[in-house]
Amino acid sequence: MSSHAASAPAALSAAPASTAPAAVKALTLGLAGIALTALGLFVSGAKVVAHSWLVGVTYWTAIAIGMLLLVLIHHIFDASWSTVIRRQFEHGLAAFKWLGLLFLPLLLASFLYDRDLIWPWLDLNHEMHGGHTVGHDPLYLKKAAFLNPGMLLGITIAFFASWIWLSSRLRRASFTQDQDGSLGWTRHNRVTAAIGLPIAALTLTFAAIYWIKSLEYHWFSTMYGVWFFANCVRGALSFGVIIMVWLWQRGDYRGILNTNHFHSIGLLMLAFTVFWAYVTFSQYFLIWNANVPEETFWYNLREINHDGASNQWKWIGIFGILFGHFFIPFFFLLSYRFKITPHILRRIAIWILAIILLDLCYNIMPALKDSHGDALPLLSLNLVWILSSVVGVGGVCGWAYLRSFGTAKLIPICDPRIGESLTHHE
Amino acid sequence: MSAQTYGLIATFKTAPSLYHAAEAVRDAGYRHWDCITPFPVHGLDKAMGLRRSVVPRISLIGGITGFCTGMSLIWWTGAVDYKLIVGGKPLFSPMFAFPVAYELTILFTAFATIIGMFVLNGLPMHYHPVLKYDQIRRGMDDTFFIVIEARDPRFNAANTRALLEQAGGETITELDP
């Protein structure tokens, strides 16, 4: 059994193979995506592009938050098996400061260009369905202390500040431990995890409420933060699988990962698939059962047009969200063989990542309405700007990850749990 | 002779020696045999050539049965046997049947898993011939054992004893049935 630990150091002492060329490629791709999205401003207008950009930024922010949560959870539980993959999540956390920068255009454009661009409650003169304005809407006035420009600005800065702060604490402690081997850093990170988990839970919940749910500020759902949380973790686990398989095939992870690491992360993917479904179904079911107009309109918008005809979002809801986001990954991940076969597990990880994007589109894009108040369809030119935003933000995040990748060892070699992790269940 | 004995039991001092002996017994083609260890030895299932358990399949069947039971229970009671409109909802909808179906999925999965596990591993078992072996208590402390049963088609008192000896077994004893 100890022979596995003995065979690992050969891979550990060498610095990881350079990812600099890949980082440049990622950045180029990202900038191309951003440029194409900017081009969209002249084709589809600022409103459409701003919503698409919101999808792109929240998508990658969700994955980064998920990685932050996984690292925090790893430390608070003093977990062992995930030690060998934790470093990759720590590299992923490098993206937060760039995500903050990429979120900035949404705030700047909302404040300086058009208050009514994304969040209707930023503009008190925004006309509501029925003729009155937001400023005279009793449902807004009740929430005005919460939904106002100062709060949006302040709380968004606070979100990114706390994520960046937690990330830099976790990264610094983990990377320094590689050098000096001090066990104090492990304790340091456990303290960070204890402080950080409530902060991360609250910030991600409020981020989901401010950035996404408030697009329809009449609507409310107490499940919303949990829904976002489930997507964050599913995204991070799936991205973790993609990184694991990539580094496995490249050779870095040979002798480090064994079948049980893939099995374990696959089990977490299955658990969070069920958790996501539980939360998402509960939200739908409670609204369906109570059947009050203040809540049902949100789903009606995603099902029928004003004339009663079904719209695209209905089919996206059934086939994309219900089947694509739950049944397909659920039955797929039930299989032991699929979970332990890297390239098959990667396939379902890519599928889940694609469906998380669809889920965010489902939550954000119907805020764009035509003159009848019907949701604009997804399959249109708008989809191009969504995809270009995702590529744009993703390219920058990938660059941040790959740039960080070269600055530290592949796995935290001085972590007290590293031996256990290298021989996970062997 | 072989009708009078349950099988042969061999002792081993360390986990690695047991592990390699298990590989030797597996490669010799025995099917009715087992290892007794004071603690779980990771990877021993592979060394013994054990396949993955079929319990997960039984669980899946239990889960599907539970889901269908829940759905049809709500459908039969609310939409067929005693039609009753509640809260202006349709007589049947998978929406409100879902919590019931979901609970029964979990319940039936749990039953199928536990019952399937007990049936497959033959528990509860009140008597087993190895319990009469005076050294067996050390299997809870510091000694590892391999038992090869006489009902195995490849069992042959002399050859099996030779195999266990060759594999590093120390004290080799015949077990009474």
Image (cartoon, rainbow, N blue to C red):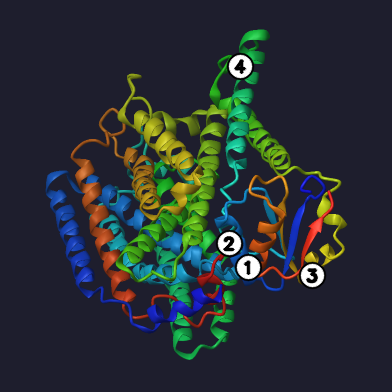
Other-residue count near label 2 (Cα within 10 Å), few / some / many at <14 / 14–19 / ≥20: some
- Residue denoted by label 2: B24
The residue type indicated by label 3 comes to Asp
Compare marks 1 and 2 and give the one earlier in the sequence.
2
Tag 2: amino acid: Ala
Chain designation of label 4? B
Labels 4 and 3 share a subunit? yes
Label 2 or label 4, whichever lies nearer to me, is: 2
Point out the residue furthest to the bottom here.
Answer: A180
Between A332 and A340, the one lying in front of the other is: A340
Residue type, label 4 = Trp
Q: CA distance from mark 1 to mark 3?
A: 24 Å
Marks 4 and 3: which is nearer the front?
3
Q: Earlier in the sequence, mark 4 or mark 1?
A: 4
Q: Is residue A249 above or below residue B85?
A: below
Residue A130 position within the rendered picture, expressed as x and y whole percent measured from the top left = 37, 30
Quarter of the image holding residue A195? bottom right
Residue nearest the viewer, comparing A181 with A174: A181
The residue at the point 46 percent across, 65 percent down is A68
Label 2 near label 1: C-beta < 8 Å?
Answer: yes
Q: Which residue is mark 3?
A: B141
How much space separates mark 1 and mark 2, taking CA atoms? 9 Å
